[in-house]
Image (cartoon, rainbow, N blue to C red):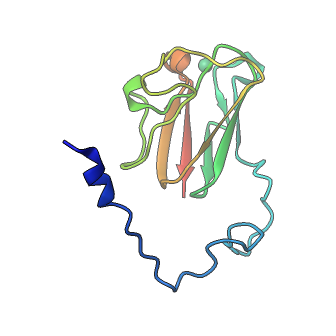
Amino acid sequence: MDRRDFVRGVGVLTISGGLAGCSGNGGDDGSGNGTDGDSGGDGNTVAVGPDGQLVFEPEEITVETGETVTWEFESASHNVSAWPSHSEEVSIPDGAEGFGTMEEDGDPMATVGQGETFEHTFETAGEYTYVCVPHVASGMVGTVIVE
Ligand SMILES: [Cu+2]
């Protein structure tokens, strides 16, 4: 009946002293893995509909967990959907979230203008098969492998 009674019970947060470097180290997030050549992320780009073709280029791309893929729409009338409810061609790993240029409950046929970009960051390893919904019947299907 009285919601405040519930609120009062929350909020006990214990922080044990052993966590190093939570904040304030001024740089990147402290990952410190020695590989240094790919900071720009330019490698993880997929062209959508280059030269008006009904393809993703490259059709398959491999990234590391936590990396971002950018889709660049080089012609009009395309989209990106990795929502399983949008196409039987879509498949995503167990526990992964779908993604797309539209929300899951949005219009699967909604397209993106030429020159637009779309980004998704992959937090769950596995293989993602995604589609351009308007052109899936023409084989406009792509794969992202997250290692
Ligand atoms: Cu398309």
Write down the quadrant of residue 80 in the picture.
top right
Give the percent coordinates (x, y) of residue 126: 47, 52
Q: Would you say 91 lies left or right of 29 here?
A: left
Closer-to-camera residue (16/27): 16
Closer-to-camera residue (67/58): 67
Work out whether residue 12 can be spotted: yes
Closer-to-camera residue (18/114): 18
Quarter placement of the C terminus: bottom right
Give the percent coordinates (x, y) of residue 35: 74, 70
Q: Would you say 36 lies left or right of 144 here?
A: right
Please report the residue visible at 60 percent of the width from the left and 58 percent of the height from the top.
64
Please report the residue visible at 46 percent of the width from the left and 77 percent of the height from the top.
15
Q: Is residue 40 above or below residue 18?
A: above
Please report the residue visible at 43 percent of the width from the left and 32 percent of the height from the top.
90
Q: Is residue 7 above or below residue 72?
A: below
Counting labels gives: 0
Work out whether residue 138 can be spotted: no
Quarter placement of the N terminus: top left
Write down the quadrant of residue 36 in the picture.
bottom right
Residue furthest to the left: 1
Please report the residue visible at 75 percent of the width from the left and 49 percent of the height from the top.
43
Give the percent coordinates (x, y) of residue 65: 56, 58
Give the percent coordinates (x, y) of residue 76: 70, 15
Q: Is residue 24 above or below residue 79?
A: below
Instruction: Report the image quarter containing ligand 1.
Output: top right
